[in-house]
Image (cartoon, helix red, strand yellow):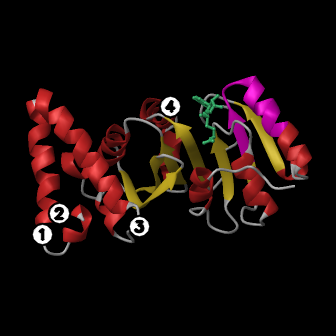
Amino acid sequence: MKLPISDRLLACAAFVVPGDRVADIGCDHGYLSIHLLTNGIAQSCIAADIHEQPLLSAVRNAEKYGVRDKMEFYLSDGVRSIPRDFSCMVCAGMGADTMVSILEAAPWLRSGKYRLILQCQSKTPMLRHYLSHHGWRITEESVLRDGRFLYTVMEVYYQPDHPRLTEAECHFPPALLENPSKEVPAYYKWVVGGLKIAAAHNGEKQPILAALEALAQTQELSWLGQ
Ligand SMILES: C[S@@+](CC[C@H](N)C(=O)[O-])C[C@H]1O[C@@H](n2cnc3c(N)ncnc32)[C@H](O)[C@@H]1O
């Protein structure tokens, strides 16, 4: 029985390190945890959701795919009501506002023990800005296409001594250029296209747009604009 997991969630799973104890916050159907357990990637998975119906569907799916005994289920707003003995927190398919409120409510996540894997659905620059200004460092970020949409997934560590991202970097972070996937130029064009529209109405966006356009004018990064 094939698990109907999306390429977007598979991209999140790719950041999980074998042996991780994963907390999947906003688990919904539970497919991410089920994939990680049936493929022997995670050591254990906590599946948590703020709503009962999604959590019940995660329990049903875990039974269906034979991993019910390896998972723990919690009705929880963010990480408020879950045990803290995990190594890696995944938040996927949520907007930046929700992710920020989850992080704000749990200062203990900043102990240095936790790695975050974040796949943000909306206001991603705002999430990067929040992370960067609150001691979190985006160490890796990948872009993928799933259907018609481009998504990014970030790996984040608490490293308060790391320099903050500039506003331009919050829109197009340096981490995307470390191991660039084939969708990075498409993402760059999408970001610049959005900024052009925004800059026509909001002068504050103009320097961000100019900084990003200058990137693709350098010889080293000219491939971004192609
Ligand atoms: C769009 S679904 C994404 C499900 C799955 N993570 C994915 O990416 O396919 C978002 C899920 O997050 C849950 N959620 C929203 N806010 C939450 C919060 N503060 N804490 C825990 N779960 C939350 C919702 O109930 C919903 O099941």
Distance between the alpha carbons at the discs numbered 2 and 1: 5 Å
First in sequence: mark 3 or mark 2?
3
Q: Secondary structure at mark 2?
A: helix
Distance between the alpha carbons at the discs numbered 4 and 3: 36 Å
The three-letter amino acid code for the residue at tag 3 is Lys
Left or right for 129, reference 1: left
First in sequence: mark 2 or mark 4?
4
Q: Residues within 10 Å of mark 1 (few under 14, many from 20)?
A: few
Left or right for 94, reference 18: left
- The residue that appears at 32% across and 67% down in the rendered structure is 177
Q: Which mark is residue 182?
A: 3
Q: Are marks 2 and 1 in contact (CB under 8 Å)?
A: yes
Q: Quadrant of ligand 1?
A: top right
For residue 113, which quarter of the picture?
A: bottom right
The three-letter amino acid code for the residue at tag 4 is Ala
Identify the magenta region: 46-59
Q: Secondary structure at mark 3?
A: loop
Residue receiving disc 4: 105
Residue receiving disc 1: 218
Position of residue 165 measured from the top left corner of the image (x, y, whole percent): 25, 52
Q: Which mark is residue 216?
A: 2
- The residue that appears at 78% across and 59% down in the rendered structure is 37
